[in-house]
Structures are given as structure tokens and as C-alpha cells.
Amino acid sequence: MRFGMPWPGREVGREAEEAGVDAFCAGEFADHDAYLTVAEIVANTERALAGPAIAYAFARTPYAHATALRHLHAQAPGRLFLGLGSAAFRVNRDWLGVPADRPVERIAETVGAVRAWLGAENGQPVRYSGEFLAVDADVRAPVLGRLDIPVLLAAFNRRMATTAARVADGIVGHGLFTASWWNDVVRPATIGRPLLEHGWIITAVDDNAPERARADARRMIAFYLTVKTYDPFVAHHGWQEQVAALRGAFRNGDSEAMAQAVTDGMLAEIAVCGTTAEAKETLARRAGSLPRDVGYFAPPSYLVSPGRRAAYARSALELIGAAAP
């Protein structure tokens, strides 16, 4: 597994690449754009892989995804990947104002249409025809040419993992993923096809305040589990009682009770946290259950200041090499 991290900003990012970080990724939310962040990554790094992990698939047309990648390729040839996520039903409907039904089928077509734009040679029309998307573009300018940029899908459940195996080059695992979820649910659903595996790993290491680091990791886990989309994951692990408690605390605005609802067992299965020594021990114990290609050691972001996230990113550099293949 290669060591990566969500982009920690210019200063820490340069330190991280010098320390041996092989990949940086960009997430997306209401206050940060995935492709603008990737532009910052490629402008401030020299060799590391860079890409969205993930960009909201339906927030842009396939043309817009592909155009952004072509623009970035000119600055970082051979270093890019594209991670797409379908986003939650309410994000699509209420934030983006796009159709929210049948996300698996829609994202499969999005990948096909993006590939049509990325695979277009100069002088050839760009064509794609599906149920939801149609492209018939005759671009009379020498601006194209095939780009082989890997496309990965955020595959939390079986259906999306199966779809990734059918239409994409790989998957992006969520920060909640456990050994059991990788090995018993996601990997079997790829029907034996070898895929690239990228994945987020909730990582909070602080030798001076390990309890605070563990509390930040618990809050991050709790915040993720407020989303009902992950109920199959919760049922798979038998965590319904704990999740009911943390969702009640979330509704009441009680972040401490949210954290307390995440048990030691849940923390051990999901996060890498505590002291540096504890984190290395966790990585050794979880060898084989982490993403096989790139693991993004991601600081908690829920109720964690930018300064503390940067400190967690620096601390995570001590873990390079600790995750044995």
C-alpha cells in the first residue's frame, strides 16, 4: 500500500511529499471544490499522484469533469486519477438540484461519457449514448487526444462495487471501512476483476494528547454514522444500538455524547489513532484489510480546527512504512 493523504495545504503538503507521501486527494463539500484543490496539489508537488477522491459525479456534466482533467493533465501528465461519488440522495436533490433516482445507473453512464471525452482523438467526434446521457460533439479544433486517466468510484455498497468492476478502473473506500467490510462485502462484489483500491483511513495521532486524538476519531466516526445510507454497514457489524444512541445525540446537538456512543471496539476496527506506537500497532494488525493500492491517512474534520488537522497530518508522516503490504 502506498501512503497518501487528503491535501493538507501547501506548507504541510510539501513536507509530506519530501517525507515520502505518494498521493494526495481532494474531497468535496459546500466550502471546497475538488478540482480547484487538485489544481493546488499539482502546482505545489512534483511527483505525487493527485485527484478527486471524490468529486460529486452529478454536480458537473461529463464534459466539465473531462475538461478539468485535460486542463490539469497539461500541468501534471501521468499523475492524475479521477474518483467519482454518487453523493447522498438529499445532496443531489436539495443541494445540486439534479435527479436523485437510480444513482448507480446514472454514475455508470457518467463514467462512460467522461471516458468518451477523455478517449477522444483529434479530428474524431465524441459520442456517447445512454438512457440518461447523450453526447454527440464534433470538436473542430486540435485540443483532444487520448488521455488514460484511471477512473474510480466511491463504492460503499455491493451494487456500486459491482458497477465499479464493470465500468471503472477501481474503487475509493470510505473512512468507515473495516476489515470485514472490505473482505466480506466490497471485494467479493467486484466479481474477481482486479481493481485499483484507494481508501480513506481515519487517522488521529498525538503523542502528547492521545485521548484527545481518540475523541476526535470517535466524533468523526459518529458523524459519518448519522447517515442512514450506511445502515447496511451498521447491521453487518451489529452496531444498531450504538448508532441509535449517537444519532439521538446528534439530533440534540451533543457532540460529546456522540463520541461516547462509539465503543472501543468500533474505534479499533475503523480508526488509526492514539499515540504513534499505538497507530503503528493498529496498522500492523490490520495489514491486508486496508486499501491495497493507496491509503489516505485522513485527519478527522468534524469539529476539528484547521490547525489541529495540520498537526494530525504531520504526525501521520511517522506512519509511513508501517502499513505492511
Image (cartoon, rainbow, N blue to C red):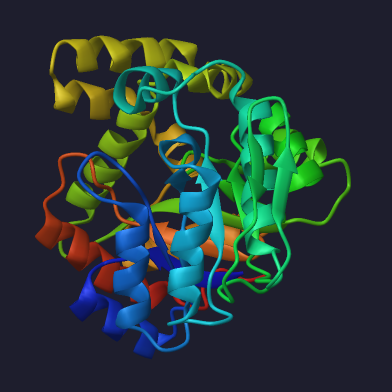
- Quadrant where the N terminus sits is bottom right
The outermost residue toward the front is 140
Residue 179: quarter of image? top right
- Is residue 281 among what the camera can see? no
Residue 90 position (above or below residue 220): above
Q: Is residue 297 above or below residue 64?
A: below
Is residue 194 found left or right of 308 in the rendered image?
right
- The answer to which image quadrant residue 198 occupies is bottom right
Classify 55 as above or below 259.
Answer: below
Task: Please name whichever residue, 172 or 145, is drawn nearer the observer in this view of the structure.
Answer: 145
Residue farthest along the right direction in this orientation:
192
Observer able to see residue 321 = yes
Q: In this view, does 118 lie to the left or right of 310?
A: right
- Residue drawn at point x = 13 percent, y = 20 percent: 254
Q: Residue at x 26, y 35 (%)?
A: 219
Between 277 and 237, the one lying in front of the other is: 237
Q: Position of residue 155 (x, y in %)?
A: 61, 39
Residue 79 location in percent, x, y? Answer: 54, 78
At x 72%, y 28%, the residue is 159
Q: Is residue 287 left or right of residue 22?
A: right
The quadrant where residue 259 appears: top left
Question: In the image, 309: left or right of 203?
Answer: left
**Residue shown at 39%/35% (left/top)?**
264
Percent x, y of residue 188: 81, 38
Q: Taking 244 as reference, is 86 above or below it?
A: below
Whole-percent x, y for residue 163 in the image: 74, 36
